[in-house]
């Protein structure tokens, strides 16, 4: 769709068709036709790949509930990655999810709609600011075209194509596409803008240099710490593990979700469950996953905190309800703790659960649940 829009615009421009007077004269008709074409393309795409489109509808539904909880200022920039799993788990725990939604749900980290993602993370304030920015740029582009600045068309088509692509995907999460988009925005916005002539003072130069040097130092330190973290993981002894290197790197990487998860998992693997728990909980603030909650549940279970362990296992199963492995972990937990009524319910869920992609591992889990049910009835 984005390619079609870009191609049509360039062709019309190259053929020197006077499209602006036509649109101005038949504004309402053009708007209706554009809407019809848009809906028709969406329908054709949905018919071509129903599962993919239905999956996006589920993501948008859950994302909208995130927006409703924080409508004005959002959940914070960059927090969609960490919060989506929590909301999806709550959605399925509430019983609102249909069997089809269970089958298509996944542990998702993108909204597949950049406008919706901006609204979720930055609220109405951030969303309107973004829309006003686009309107201002379009106004500048219109003036550029009227003033015979032909090259403006290339930049405005690029912006329009990326925005259209952003209705169904996540182009702003790609560094190259995002950089291209904001470069085009900046260029078009500067067409009818008088740039301020500013000559920095000595103090201003000092402050600017200090900021740049500080940013460079922090960036280099983080990059170096990431390489040190990789080496620490590779050289960690399984027999007598030493976590001194992880402790040294923690102050620098304390907001890196991947590092925190790895640190906590290594502690849990070494049997240091009590120490691992706070690191798993902190890791969940920067990036959620089913694996994280399964690990956290096992740590709670190993330290005798069964109520917390059960909560984490249940949350893990509902974050991505089509997976079988989390249900197997919950079944094992109920068996070990003697909660046979709950174990029976989970075993029945496993046996009746639909399979998206058949595998030998799923067959083993289903057979295990069936054996438990047969044994429990004896």
Image (cartoon, grey):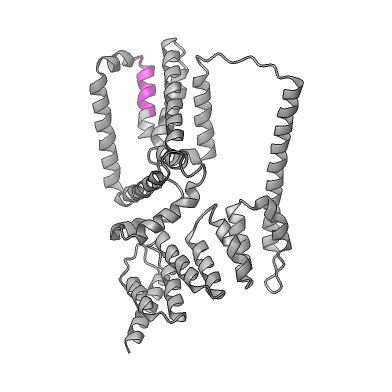
Q: Could you say which quadrant of the image residue 320 lies in?
A: bottom left
Q: Nearer the viewer, residue 143 or 94?
A: 94
In the displayed structure, 65 sits above or below 327; it is above
Which quadrant: the N terminus? top left
Left or right, 299 with reference to 15: right
Image side of residue 347 versus residue 211, left or right: left
The residue that appears at 26% across and 19% down in the rendered structure is: 27
Q: Position of residue 184 (x, y in %)?
A: 50, 26
Is 301 in front, or is 81? 301
Rendering coords of residue 139 (x, y %): 42, 18
Q: Quick check: can you spot residue 320?
A: no
Answer whether residue 290 is visible to the viewer in this image. Answer: yes
Res 8 quadrant in image: top left
Span colored in magenta: 6-18
Front residue of this view, candidates 103 and 341: 341
Q: Look at the image and tell me in which quarter the C terminus lies.
A: bottom left
Q: Residue visible at 26% across and 14% down?
A: 25
Query: What secondary structure prevails in the magenta region?
Result: helix
Q: Quadrant of residue 93?
A: bottom left
- Position of residue 307 in the picture relative to residue 240 (left or right): left
In the image, residue 185 lies at what x, y percent?
49, 25
Examine the rendered structure and indicate whether residue 63 appears above or below residue 125: below
Kindly identify the residue that appears in the image at 30 percent across and 13 percent down: 21
- The picture places residue 209, in percent across and down from the top left corner, at 73, 29
Does 342 appear above or below 151? Answer: below
Residue at horizontal 40%, vertical 55%?
88
In magenta stretch: residue 7: yes
């Amino acid at each position: 769709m984005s390619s079609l829009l870009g191609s049509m615009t360039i062709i019309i421009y190259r053929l020197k068709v006077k499209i602006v007077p036509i649109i101005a004269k038949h504004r309402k008709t053009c708007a209706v036709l554009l809407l019809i074409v848009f809906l028709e393309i969406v329908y054709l795409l949905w018919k071509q790949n129903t599962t993919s489109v239905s999956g996006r509808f589920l993501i948008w539904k859950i994302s909208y509930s995130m927006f409703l909880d924080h409508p004005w200022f959002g959940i914070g920039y960059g927090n969609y990655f960490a919060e989506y799993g929590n909301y999806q788990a709550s959605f399925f725990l509430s019983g609102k999810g249909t069997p089809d939604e269970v089958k298509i749900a996944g542990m998702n980290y993108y909204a597949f709609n950049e406008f919706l993602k901006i609204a979720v993370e930055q609220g109405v304030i951030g969303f309107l600011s973004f829309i006003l920015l686009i309107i201002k740029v379009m106004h500048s582009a219109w003036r550029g075209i009227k003033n015979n600045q032909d090259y403006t068309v290339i930049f405005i088509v690029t912006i329009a194509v990326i925005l259209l692509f952003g209705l169904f995907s996540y182009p702003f999460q790609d560094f190259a596409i995002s950089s291209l988009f904001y470069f085009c925005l900046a260029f078009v916005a500067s067409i009818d803008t008088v740039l301020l002539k500013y000559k920095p003072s000595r103090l201003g130069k000092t402050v600017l240099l200090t900021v740049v040097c500080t940013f460079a130092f922090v960036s280099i330190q983080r990059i170096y710490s990431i390489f040190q973290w990789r080496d620490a993981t590779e050289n960690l002894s399984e027999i007598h593990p030493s976590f001194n290197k992880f402790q040294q790197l923690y102050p620098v990487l304390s907001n890196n979700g991947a590092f925190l998860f790895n640190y906590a998992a290594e502690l849990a693997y070494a049997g240091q469950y009590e120490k691992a728990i706070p690191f798993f909980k902190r890791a969940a603030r920067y990036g959620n996953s089913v694996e994280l909650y399964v690990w956290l549940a096992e740590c709670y279970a190993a330290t005798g905190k069964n109520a917390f362990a059960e909560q984490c296992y249940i949350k893990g199963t509902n974050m991505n309800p089509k997976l079988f492995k989390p249900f197997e972990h919950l079944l094992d937990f109920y068996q070990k703790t003697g909660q046979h009524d709950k174990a029976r319910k989970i075993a029945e869920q496993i046996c009746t659960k639909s399979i998206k992609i058949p595998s030998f591992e799923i067959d083993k889990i289903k057979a295990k649940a069936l054996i438990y049910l047969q044994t429990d009835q004896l």
